[in-house]
Image: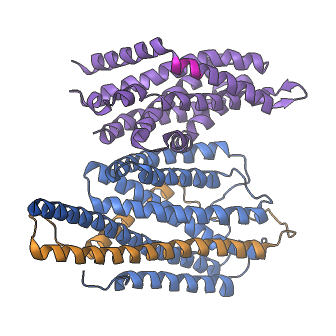
Chain colours: A orange, B purple, C blue
């Protein structure tokens, strides 16, 4: 099941990559901005850069932590649910109840 | 019963309902008027409304007013609770989609006919290049009606749909609004067609995409 | 369920760890090896991860649209979950682009925000991604949410391309983008592609992590249904 999920995400990601590559190619693949004509030294660039990186990593980190926490909670609930189901299954197994497929 | 006839019947039913209650269209006209007045206040300069804001006022008012109409588009079926029944005709969901899109087009067309002179008077503009403005308005209304009908259908089964319709609709309609504003602004200054032909083509492409995709997605959503 | 609760599978942990390590390495290269930009100075170092996030965003949202189409044509819960995970991660990347973009623009263009085509496109695409996620969560039933979210995601792809064209035409008078400028040395090029690869690895692991979470949640819904069916059956038998 997990392998299937990983394969699916890989395939999905690859599709996205091909699509993106196609779009970028059609668009002329501009990657960088022309910076040469702007020379202005009054703005504190270092601070801006620091903020940018902090926000970016904050976002990614917060998302990863939130997802992981939510997942561990789901797993706990799942285990409790499975216990109850097993408890039930001792007395009567209903037809067509799918076994946990992990 | 053929698809066209079914579409016509559904449209006629909706028009009859609208004619009897006169709620939706009347409210749309009133809302359009209010929008223009509020915009005129917003852009007042030394007692005169700013002429160069006319394209923006026109298109944003149409966008807002269209939203008001779309929120009530599926109301008759919603209140009767038979949306899935109407959708399940022998010709599929297409008659329902097209009758609703045409109804929205009809309403917003009437609003536009009312709105353009009002804006011209309130903002003291002479309507130069009216044919081109009319063309851009027609393209804009068609795209808005097709995409809007789909959006209204998507939101039919969703909570807080009044708040969510703009979220779904406005970002997607950006090409139409940008194009419409640009064409109107250029046509008002009597620019030649070549100056804005690209925008007209873009709006046409947008209309083609939504006219093809929206009924197809509508069929997938209302099953 | 062989694993103990609240423990991630090794594959996922490896992916996340690899992504993080690559990001740290890329950051090290960006800050200690790559030279500062001749004109802009240190602020140009935003560029590496800014563009990397933009790549990640585009990739994730294209994948989300593609999987939405697949799921509409041939319903498949795993594909649908992958699409949802991609939409979420794409949204995170878009937020990253939209915060680092203005910070960089403040320095290089002297203004926090310009309606520059790429920035405008990113903003609108972010709004559409949010709309998809909100529609999903606001629907009365999960299956309805899935259908309408996917319908919107499918429509979003061609419309986003038209938005791209429109904002290019609209913002056409701005100080613009030329092909391949900006990168001035091979160290910069390594920093750039290194950052892109690192961010994409991290993004892929995040998608996989989220995908696993969604699949677990779906599994839990099924188990709940089973349990209530069992309870109903027992109540009937007890009578």
Residue B25 in magenta? yes
Q: Is residue C160 left or right of residue C143?
A: right
Q: Residue at x 79, y 18 (%)?
A: B124
Q: Main secondary structure of the magenta part?
A: helix
Which of the image's four quarters has the C terminus of chain C?
bottom left
Q: Nearer the viewer, residue C129 or A17?
A: C129
In the image, residue B109 lies at what x, y percent? 54, 19
Q: Residue at x 75, y 15 (%)?
A: B121
Corner quadrant of residue B52: top right
Q: Nearer the viewer, residue B29 or B110?
A: B29
In the image, residue B99 lies at what x, y percent? 37, 23
Q: Is residue C219 left or right of residue C28?
A: left
In the image, residue B35 lies at what x, y percent? 68, 27
Q: Residue at x 34, y 53 (%)?
A: C142
C116, above or below A81, in the image: above
Q: Is residue C92 left or right of residue B75?
A: right
Please give the range of residues in magenta: B23-28
Which of the image's four quarters has the N terminus of chain C?
bottom left
Any part of residue B72 in sight: yes
């Amino acid at each position: 099941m997990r392998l299937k999920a990983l394969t699916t995400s890989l395939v999905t990601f690859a599709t996205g990559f091909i699509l993106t590559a196609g779009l970028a190619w059609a668009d002329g693949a501009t990657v960088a901005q022309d910076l040469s004509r702007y020379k202005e030294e009054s703005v504190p660039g270092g601070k801006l850069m620091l903020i940018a990186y902090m926000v970016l990593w904050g976002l990614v980190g917060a998302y990863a932590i939130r997802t992981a926490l939510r997942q561990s909670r789901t797993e706990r609930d799942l285990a409790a649910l499975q216990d109850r189901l097993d408890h039930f299954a001792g007395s009567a197994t209903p037809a067509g109840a799918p076994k946990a497929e992990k | 019963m053929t698809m066209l006839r079914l579409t016509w019947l559904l449209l006629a039913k909706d028009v009859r309902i609208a004619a009897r209650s006169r709620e939706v269209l009347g409210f749309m006209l009133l809302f359009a008027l209010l929008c223009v007045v509020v915009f005129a206040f917003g852009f007042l300069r030394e007692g005169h409304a700013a002429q160069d804001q006319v394209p923006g006022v026109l298109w944003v008012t149409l966008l807002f007013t269209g939203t008001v109409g779309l929120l009530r588009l599926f109301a008759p079926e919603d209140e009767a609770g038979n949306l899935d029944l109407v959708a399940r005709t022998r010709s599929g969901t297409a008659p329902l989609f097209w009758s609703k899109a045409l109804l929205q087009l009809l309403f917003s067309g009437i609003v536009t006919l009312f709105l353009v002179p009002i804006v011209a008077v309130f903002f003291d503009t002479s309507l130069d290049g009216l044919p081109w403005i009319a063309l851009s308005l027609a393209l804009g209304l068609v795209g808005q009606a097709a995409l809007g009908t789909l959006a209204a259908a998507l939101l039919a089964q969703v909570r807080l749909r009044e708040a969510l319709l703009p979220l779904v609709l406005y970002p997607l309609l950006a090409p139409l609004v940008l194009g419409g504003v640009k064409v109107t602004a250029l046509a008002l200054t009597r620019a030649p067609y070549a100056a804005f032909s690209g925008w007209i083509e873009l709006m046409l492409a947008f209309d083609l995409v939504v006219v093809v995709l929206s009924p197809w997605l509508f069929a997938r959503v209302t099953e | 369920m062989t694993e103990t609760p609240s423990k991630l599978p090794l594959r996922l942990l490896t992916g996340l760890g690899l992504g993080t390590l690559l990001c740290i390495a890329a950051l090290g290269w960006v800050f200690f090896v790559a030279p500062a930009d001749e004109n802009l100075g240190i602020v140009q170092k935003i560029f590496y991860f800014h563009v990397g996030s933009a790549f990640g965003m585009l990739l994730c949202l294209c994948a989300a649209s593609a999987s939405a189409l697949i799921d509409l044509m041939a319903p498949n819960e795993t594909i649908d979950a992958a699409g949802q995970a991609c939409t979420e991660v794409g949204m995170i990347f878009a937020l990253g682009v939209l915060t680092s973009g203005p910070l960089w623009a403040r320095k290089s263009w002297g203004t926090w925000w310009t309606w520059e085509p790429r920035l405008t496109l990113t903003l609108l695409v972010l709004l559409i991604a949010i709309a998809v996620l909100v529609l999903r969560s606001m629907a009365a039933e999960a299956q309805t949410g899935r259908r309408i979210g996917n319908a919107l995601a499918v429509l979003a792809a061609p419309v986003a391309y038209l938005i791209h064209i429109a904002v290019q035409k609209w913002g056409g008078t701005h100080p613009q983008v030329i092909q391949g400028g900006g990168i001035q040395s091979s160290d910069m090029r390594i920093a750039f592609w290194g950052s892109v690869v690192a961010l994409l690895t991290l993004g892929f692991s995040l998608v996989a992590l989220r995908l696993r979470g969604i699949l677990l949640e779906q599994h839990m819904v099924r188990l709940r249904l089973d349990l209530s069916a069992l309870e109903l059956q027992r109540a009937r038998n007890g009578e």
